[in-house]
Amino acid sequence: MSPVQPQAEATLAPDTRFGRYRLVRCIGVGGMGAVYEAIHDDLEKRVAIKTLHPSMARDPEARARFLREGRAASRIRHPNVVEVFDVGQHEDTLFLVMEHLVGEDLAALLVRDGPLPVEQLVDLALPVIAAVATAHEEGVVHRDLKPENIFLAQTRNGAVQPKVLDFGISKVSGVPAAQRITGAASMVGTPLYMSPEQAQGRALDGRSDQYALGVILYECATGRVPYDAPDLYPLLHAIVQGQHASPRSLRADLPADFEAVIERAMACDADRRYDSLHGLGHALLPFASRTNRGLWRDVFGAAPTPLQQPAFVAPPVPVATRAAAPTLLPRVNEICRITRRLRKTSRLPAISLALLAAGLVAAAVLLPSRAPIVRASTRPNATTPAVVVAPAVVAVAPAVVALAPAVEAPVVAPVAIVARPRVVRSRAVVVRIDAGIAAPFRLCGGVPCP
């Protein structure tokens, strides 16, 4: 038989007071009660007050469910769960004080717009899945998820923030047996969104909420509920048997992978569904907008997305082999060996050896790299001044070494960065120091040696 709709009861008049709250207007009426817009006198804060119908308040089970909604919602701290501030009783009326929301529920959006684009649908579903997953972590199973209990609140900047409502028939773990409202064999919830185990009155866990979310995804994608029957028994039989049209048969442009996610969440066997709502969110993440993939990646874990492509790796660029720069070190080494032999065999004064070595260096620099070494035979007189080598240095003070007879110990000069060629002149030799030759050297018998 068709479910019996409860008779609408008289609503409370504006300006009715509930302690410090003053009612402004009625904004909705349901089977168990009504919702009013109200103002807190002292804070001037706009809130929503949900009341229980007087006829329902006489039922102990209805009163317990109403109060449990407040406890369950206040137990779940999540931005996508409606916040409950207070609970109380005014005369014979029980009431909950909740945050005031502006917008519409998901059912109204579907009536107005019909089937939703996949990206928009997933963007709305991910925060709802995250909110219900948080409820599961707190030991709360909603048991009545449906489009009417998903409110699309408008924020100040015009964005849409889904909010999960109505935990009135939720199952809360840790409640003593004496306070439980429904037994193991009772059936609660809205039949169109019931899981097979819920339709059979079996024990429920979070996978039952996952099934209801799968039905909501099906309806939002196709514009139709998967099971529909004029009477309750045929409807429950179809749910238990899992006999429904595939989403792509009703809307051909749906991605096959997206259809697979819906079908798995709606599997008749609870063990074939995702292990948790985090798995469902992870599977839906690739179909969200780029912004929401970034927002929910940390919650549901990174997943491959249609926009992700393998990273482009440029092929390695071959490095051309550079010829070694010409160096005078072999020539200078040879000059050093000649100088050491001259010192051992010659009896010339030290000043003469110094001038002779300087001449050999000049010849090594000026002549081609394979030219023979020219031995200097000119013997300078005693009045010939000593050659002073002063290379041009950048940011380093030049080391000026006077080649005098008294210099015998090796002297180490700093590394010189030669800026440009310099020419050092004396009466005996002209020494050219090429740019680009920069190496530590020492005096070896009056000749710079490497």
Image (cartoon, grey):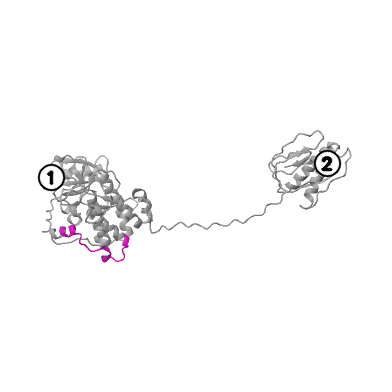
Q: Give amino acid for label 2.
A: Leu
Q: Which is more toward the observer, 14 or 377?
A: 377
Q: Which mark is residue 355?
A: 2
Residue 124, position in %: x, y? 30, 54
Residue 135, position in %: x, y? 26, 46
Q: Which mark is residue 377?
A: none
Residue 322, position in %: x, y? 65, 54
N-terminal label among 2 and 1: 1
* Span colored in magenta: 236-257
Tell whether 119 sits left or right of 3. right
Task: Tell me if I can see residue 387 in this picture.
Answer: no
Q: Residues within 10 Å of mark 1 (few under 14, many from 20)?
A: some
Q: Which mark is residue 61?
A: 1
The local secondary structure at tag 1 comes to helix
Q: Residues within 10 Å of mark 2 (few under 14, many from 20)?
A: many
Q: Which is more toward the observer, 391 or 128?
A: 391
Query: Quadrant of the image for the C terminus?
Result: top right
Say whether residue 296 is magenta.
Answer: no
Query: Quadrant of the image for the N terminus?
Result: bottom left
Task: Tell me if I can see residue 428 in this picture.
Answer: yes
Q: Residue sitting at 17 percent across and 60 percent down?
A: 238
Residue 105, position in %: x, y? 25, 54
Q: Residue sitting at 10 percent across and 47 percent down?
A: 55
Asked if 247 appears above or below 131 in the picture, the reply is: below
Q: Give amino acid for label 1.
A: Glu
